[in-house]
Image: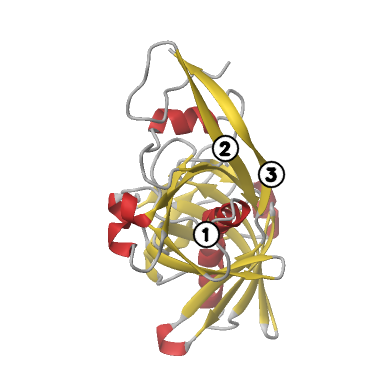
Amino acid sequence: MLILSDMSDTATTSATAKLHLTKVQATGNDFLLVLDPDGLRPLRRETVAALCDRRLGIGADGMIRAVRSASIPEGACLAASAEWFMDYVNADGSVAEMCGNGVRAFVRYLVHRELVSGRLAVGTRAGVRWVERVRGGFRIDMGPWRITGRTMVRADGISERRGLAINLGNPHVVVPVSGEELAALRLAQAPALDPPAPEGANVEFVVTECTEGMGRVRMRVSERGVGETLSCGTGSVAAALAAREWAGGVPNVWEVRIPGGVVEVEMTGGEKEQVTLAGPAEVVFDGEFTFHHP
């Protein structure tokens, strides 16, 4: 039996709560999604942590509430551009600003529930992200990004080295490693950062290769609030941007291979550069679940 708090603001002693959940995976990054269009059932930290627990709950890297932007304080200023807001929370219940794989999973869910079609604006805590369907999945306009500095990284299985800090609405540190080091990494514990990131950071360990017109990245990632995951969308973009920086500014198309699959990152547009992320997202299951809480 899974014991957790009701998602509503009020809980009844010894009551039973029913919740309709859909699980969606995007290159192995998996999410539990719930529909709350009017913003009446905010996600509670302890509820999310219990549901996302892979041994004692259902299991997921995070949970997403689909709520209309006008119905949530964080989305009110975005409502004119984006009807729907992605209220995303990590597996430990901590709030995240942005998740590239989560955006694809979110749009796949809205399509699955027959709530949207065509090109779509999605509200996130990092701003509006545009999404369109493409062959094999969805392409996201990842919005603005910036290099924020260099950070020393310590992780189990490799020597200390310097990583490139990149912000895509959420913070990342990208660390170059060899193929042997990538395989030797042990990410049961989160990598240590110096200087520390005040809000934490996702850390990507990457092996890069450049050929004419195309770059390739192999990557493993430790996500804040989750641990090692099979994939990270914003992390894949950060890895491609870092790899291009190290390669002298080219190429502008990168294939990023993570344990959960393959995504494509493309940079276009010159001074006001646009960065997009394309990859699959699929519904795993959909159903109504009954939870008991004291």
Q: Nearer the viewer, mark 2 or mark 3?
A: 2
Q: Quadrant of the N terminus?
A: top right
Q: Residues within 10 Å of mark 1 (few under 14, many from 20)?
A: many
**118 over 83 or under it: above or below:** below
Q: Secondary structure at mark 3?
A: strand
- Looking at marks 2 and 1 on the same chain, the residue that comes earlier in the sequence is marked by 2
Q: Quadrant of the C terminus?
A: top left
Q: CA distance from mark 2 to mark 3?
A: 11 Å
- Looking at marks 2 and 3 on the same chain, the residue that comes earlier in the sequence is marked by 2
**188 over 278 or under it: above or below:** above
Q: Nearer the viewer, mark 2 or mark 1?
A: 2
The residue wearing badge 2 is 21
Q: Is the C-beta separation of discs 2 and 1 under 8 Å?
A: no
Task: Work out whether residue 45 or residue 262 is closer to the camera in this orientation and state it.
Answer: 45
Which mark, by number, is residue 100?
1
Q: Residues within 10 Å of mark 2 (few under 14, many from 20)?
A: some
Residue 10 is left or right of residue 104, and the answer is left
The residue wearing badge 3 is 284
Q: Residue at x 54, y 56 (%)?
A: 115
Q: Residue at x 38, y 33 (%)?
A: 44
Which mark, by number, is residue 50?
none
Amino acid type of the residue that numbered disc 1 sits on in the rendered structure:
Gly
Residue 10: image quadrant is top left
Decide if residue 122 is in sight here: yes
Q: Residue at x 38, y 36 (%)?
A: 41
Q: Is the C-beta separation of discs 2 and 3 under 8 Å?
A: no
- Looking at marks 1 and 3 on the same chain, the residue that comes earlier in the sequence is marked by 1
Task: Work out whether residue 253 or residue 154 is closer to the camera in this orientation and state it.
Answer: 253
Q: Secondary structure at mark 2?
A: strand
